[in-house]
Amino acid sequence: MLVDAEIQVTAQARNGTYPGARSDQIRTLFLTARPKLVALASSLTQNPEGAADVVQDAFVRALNASSFPVAPDEQLFYMIRVVINVARNRARREAVAGRAFPWLHRPVRFDEHLGEGHDETGRLLDSIAHLSIRQREAIYLRYWLDLSIVDTAAAMGVSKGAVKTHTARAMSQLKSAIGDPR
Amino acid sequence: MTFEDNLRRRLPETVTEQDASAKELATLWDNVMVRSRRRKSLQRVAAASAISVVVVAVALVGLSHRSPTSLEVGVASRGPEKPTSVASAGTTTVKGAATSTPAGSAQTTHAPEPSATLGSQADPTTTPVPTSLPTPTSGQPDVTSPTSTTSDPPTPDGTGCLNDRLVPYYEPDVPNGPDAPAARLINRFLASQAALDLRSSGTCLLAIGPFFDQQTGDWGALVSVREDTSGLATRIRDLIGLDGSVQVFVSDATR
């Protein structure tokens, strides 16, 4: 026969509110979603070497944040938002550092990691690298993660109109850079 | 195929997803936990530091806002106690002087009853404070210079004379306080030839300090001497009573 304390623990385990449940949920998310989040951070910051650190920093913030959602289907979206914020902050910091100390800042090109036979992809990467970080966010969230405009706006922390504007300007630049296949 | 479809097809090629082994992931997660704990402790330290800084800042602001205005109010309310505090050696003599005023002394005929005046000053609520204070004239001594001359105890020989312990200036409790005009008068006297004559003549100076005339509402200087030799009282009054707005009382006291 279960005593009251055991009943309470069992209920907490069932609904995920037991002590340490949040940490366990974040750990599970880290183990499953880390590769995709690292790839997203790498694309946004245009810095593959620092992407893993961005994701790690994002999970540190999630562990210390009280706003981490309880619902599992919202947790990945929450982490995407955190990664975007951390990546954006880091990109701004690196841009400032690049202006102040240009000899210390060496931009890392994606095509350095691609090898041979990726001419079109290399051109696309080069074009994406010339977009602003907001435009990159809109492009990757809309066309890589296939998020809706509403979700993209929520992830970027901007309005739907702003998402459309960023997307349209990014598409225009990419079209002029790599050509329209139609 | 639209450009959007083309982009949707080619964009994943630009993204490199790197898988990690379970062991590597466990190590990475441990790093996350370590960084999380470090971040929490740093946040606690930062919060404690911020609280300390705020407490110190509030304390400093509080100290810096002890304005002269509030102190002046305090002085005004306790103003009547000044003569007692600065004329320790002469207070007793002053009381005695009320009954032993020499006949023919023009200076003391207009003086209020000293004991009654000092006693009535103990009630701060009824004590008027001069609203228009006389402005200092050029050449007056600096009233901010230190120390009162009359707060010292009686001399070891028991005479109570302050002659040998006169210092040049009397400092009011608060610069520009209600007793500042009286302090200026006293300073003028102490820096004068009359004070030097007082020392050289051997006349015993028993007390000197600010004095408040409740009847006129004026501050004055009370100088108490044991005996008025060679018209010293007249000379002192002539010297420091030049300012008509301040009445000077000279008490010629004898023991």
Image (tube, coloured by chain):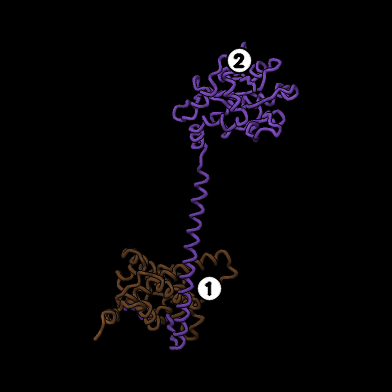
Chain colours: A brown, B purple
Q: What is the x, y in percent for residue A51?
A: 47, 76
Q: What is the x, y in percent for residue B29?
A: 44, 81
Question: In the image, what residue type sits under mark 1?
Answer: Pro
- Are both tags, 2 and 1, on one chain? no
Q: Is residue B7 visible?
A: no
Secondary structure under tag 2 reads loop
Q: Chain of mark 2?
A: B
Q: What is the x, y in percent for residue B44?
A: 47, 66
Q: Are marks 2 and 1 in contact (CB under 8 Å)?
A: no
Q: Residues within 10 Å of mark 2 (few under 14, many from 20)?
A: some
Q: Nearer the viewer, residue B76 or B90?
A: B90
**Numbered label attached to residue A107:** 1
Q: Chain of mark 1?
A: A
User: Between tags 2 and 1, which lies in front?
Assistant: 2
The structure residue drawn at horizontal position 32% and vertical position 79%, both measured from the top left corner, is B1
- Residue identified by numbered label 2: B107
Work out which residue is located at the far right of the displayed protein and give it. Answer: B200
Instruction: Give the vertical position of A49 relative to B87 (above or below).
Output: below
Q: Nearer the viewer, residue A9 or A167?
A: A9
